[in-house]
Each structure stands twice: as C-alpha cells, then as structure tokens.
Amino acid sequence: MTFRGLIVITFILFGLNGCKKNSDKTVTQQHNNKPNIIFILGDDVGYEIPTCDGGTSYSTPNIDKLASEGMRFTQCRSAPLCSPSRFMILTGKYNFRNYTTWGQMDIGQRTIGNLLKDAGYATCYAGKWQLDGGDKSIKTFGFDNYSVWLPFYQCPEGIRYKSAPIYENGNFLPQSVTDNKYSEDHFTDYILNFIDNNKSNAFFIYYSMILCHKEWSPTPDDAGYAAWQPIEGNNDKNYFPSMVKYMDKKIGIILDKIKSAGLEKNTIVFYVGDNGTQKEITSGYLNDSITGAKSESIEYGIHVPLICKWPDVIAPGKLNSDIVDFTDILPTMADIANISVSQKYKPVDGFSFYNALKDVNNDARSWSFCHYYPRMCGKYIGLERWAQDTAYKLYETGNFYHFTEDIMQEHPLSNASLTAQQIQIKQSLQDVINSMHN
C-alpha cells in the first residue's frame, strides 16, 4: 500500500493530533488506495487571525497545533468576497469561466464533490451553502449527505447562529430542533455522525463554517448566550474574539474525533479562510495591527491562512512560501487522492501543490490571478482583474504596485520610475492577465 492509501485528507483551514495505530480494521482504511478528505473553510478569517500566522489578539490553539504538526503556507490568496472564492475552490476555475451571479452557481458546473464522488467517495457538506438550489444543487454538485444553512439564494441572508434555519434531506429541520441551538454545534454533530457511519469508506467532508462572519454575537461558551436574541443585524464586534475561539474549538472537536476513531494516520487536514476579515475588525499582528479589508483587493482583503497536516508525509512545523490561489485546491485534491481530472472538469486553471506537501521538487506557480466581478444583493461591484507575485501586483487597468512596500496600494508605480527588474516583472504579470480569457 502506498502513502496515499494510508491518508485521509482533511481540508480545514485549522488542526490534528497524533494517535497510536491499533488493531481495529478501520484504522488502515484500504479504500482501494483512496484517502479520506476533510476540508474546513473559515468565513471572513484573514491571515492575521491565527496566532501561528502572527496574530496576537485571539486564542487559536487547535489551528496553531495543526500548523506545528503540519505545513503552514504564507502566500495563499483568495477573492475579496466569499461567493467568488467558493466558486474557485469548488471548480478549480477562475470566475470568468464559472461565475454567474452572487450565491447562484450554474447547475452545469462540476466540483470537487463530483470529482471525489465519481471516484467512490462518500461525500458530506456541512455549514454555509450559499450556492442556491437546495437539495437539487447540493446533490448535483456531488454531495449526497448534507446539513446546511442558506440552501437557497436570499438577500438579506437571515439569522446564522442561534436558532438559525438548517436544511437537511430536502427540508428545513423543525423549529423545535433548531430553537436556541447554535448552528455550528449542529453541523459538527452532523459531521461526527457522518464519520461514525463511514469509517470503512473513503470519505470527503467539506465543512464550510459560518464562523466568524457577522452577526457578531455570543457563542454557547459566553455568559450572554441564553439571553441573546437572534435578530438580524444585531451585531456586537466585542464578541468577535470569542467567536474565533469557538471556531477553533469546533475544529478541535473534529480532529479529536478523527483521532478517537483511529483515522488520524489516514487523514490530511487543510484549513483555509475564504477572504479577508471584515472591515470593522482590527487585530493585533506581530508588532503592528491590521484592519480587515473584506471586499477589497488589497492584501488585507485577499491574504488568507492555509494550513495542512498530513501525518508521515509532512514533517512537523514546515513553512511553505509558494504562491497558492484557490483554483489550486481541486487539482491538489485530485493528486492526493490519485484521481485523474477528466475532460468534464476542464479547463482547470489551478496548479497542484501536491509535491509541495511531500516536500519534493514542486513546480510552484510564480503568480496568482483574480477575476473579481461579484453581484451582491442585486448590485454589481466594479470589475477588477489582477495578477501578482509575492511583492508586486498589476491590475488590468495598468495600475502597478509594490504592495509589500505600499500595503494599502495608494501609490501606483509610474513607468518612468521602474527599474529593469520591475519592467520585467510588470510584463510577466501583464502576460498572465492577457492569457485569461474564455
């Protein structure tokens, strides 16, 4: 059996602990050499939030442990908002190929869920759906088991935490089930049951967390939870630190489950944030502070955490500075699971970073790209297209920034001021932008 046959992929954007192999037949999980996969996506969690990335304002012990036992990426970038980001993650395509309108993915698209289901995986989706269509779209996109919030497009989106409406098996759960229940508690319980029911199967879990998106409100660990009334728009950003802590706690519960089920050696975990932190939140970062820039294309709006643990493959505490963008996730999953990406999923814009996970020669991308033109609640945000490396960013409009020196992108570089090296970098990024068309 290869390493791939001994691995379960857990995509989290957060943690995992070691465990001793026992004689239980579920531990080896032969699965015809197909690893299990868990992908956890944090909502509105910028790079500055986890302590392991340099954050100083929050408690993230499970995310930090994931990083200390796995690989932490320093150059992962998203789109500025969640819907465009999720389209890229699921399809491996840039948004000029797959984006129609906010929260409504075209039913003709194919996703990571389809890819892994076609390869024999049991598939599960829990948390924020936001792709419209309810049962039909969830299953069409490859997820047979699901427990979700926001199964149909709506604006405003409604209550998301305490007493939130939850949708399973084609229907909303009775109010008697969800009243005063914290949605993330329900979703993690659903995931734990799914794991129990699929110990002998290859499985893929996509956990699209609602935390830490506002409405900022008490979690069940806060004294004010019982009295809090879940009224839409009732926000208090003072609860944001406890929400980060609760997100981390939920991740830890899932990781503990993998360990207690004897599946830890068979599991790879990825944790990612979907875009930058919301603008009302200012967080300590190293010796400075960062104000979130969700919806903006500056670094604070698109630089997100990416952490992965893969026992016996990734050496503990590895740091990776390769550029990763969200189109890379689908081809990387395919490689980890030893699956060929068939023609029906193509074109795929992403580059697999599978070799980077194994710490062998990796043909790392030298740029990332974004096509950003979201419709949000009936209004289109102006089109932005850009390419960047780890220090420079070029927009299709021609604005060129040295963003590591000008983090707020207030001073575009003039052509007359460019060095020979900067001229070369700008041309390379322009070539990327020119190549991005249907």
Image (cartoon, rainbow, N blue to C red):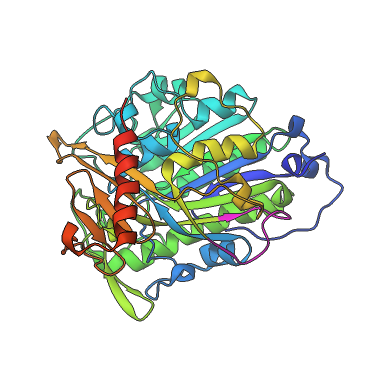
Q: Residue furthest right?
A: 23
Q: Residue 280 occupies which quadrant of the picture?
A: bottom left
- Whether residue 321 appears in this view of the structure is yes
Give the percent coordinates (x, y) of residue 314: 67, 57
Q: Residue furthest front?
A: 420
| Viewer-side residue, 412 vs 173 | 412
Q: Residue 25 occupies which quadrant of the picture?
A: top right
- Whether residue 164 appears in this view of the structure is no
From what the image shows, is residue 435 above or below residue 274?
above
Residue drawn at (52%, 25%) of the image: 114
Give the percent coordinates (x, y) of residue 304: 39, 56
In the figure, is residue 222 to the left or right of 207? left
Give the percent coordinates (x, y) of residue 375: 19, 35
From what the image shows, is residue 45 above or below residue 84?
below
In the figure, is residue 307 to the left or right of 428? right
| Quadrant in the picture for the N terminus | top right
Q: Residue 158 occupies which quadrant of the picture?
A: top left
Residue 408 falls inside the magenta stretch: no
| Quadrant in the picture for the C terminus | top left
Residue drawn at (70%, 44%) of the image: 7
Magenta part of the chain: 308-320
Give the percent coordinates (x, y) of residue 121: 63, 29
Residue drawn at (50%, 32%) of the image: 112
How many numbered marks have been drawn onto this rendered protein structure?
Answer: 0
In the figure, is residue 101 to the left or right of 388? left
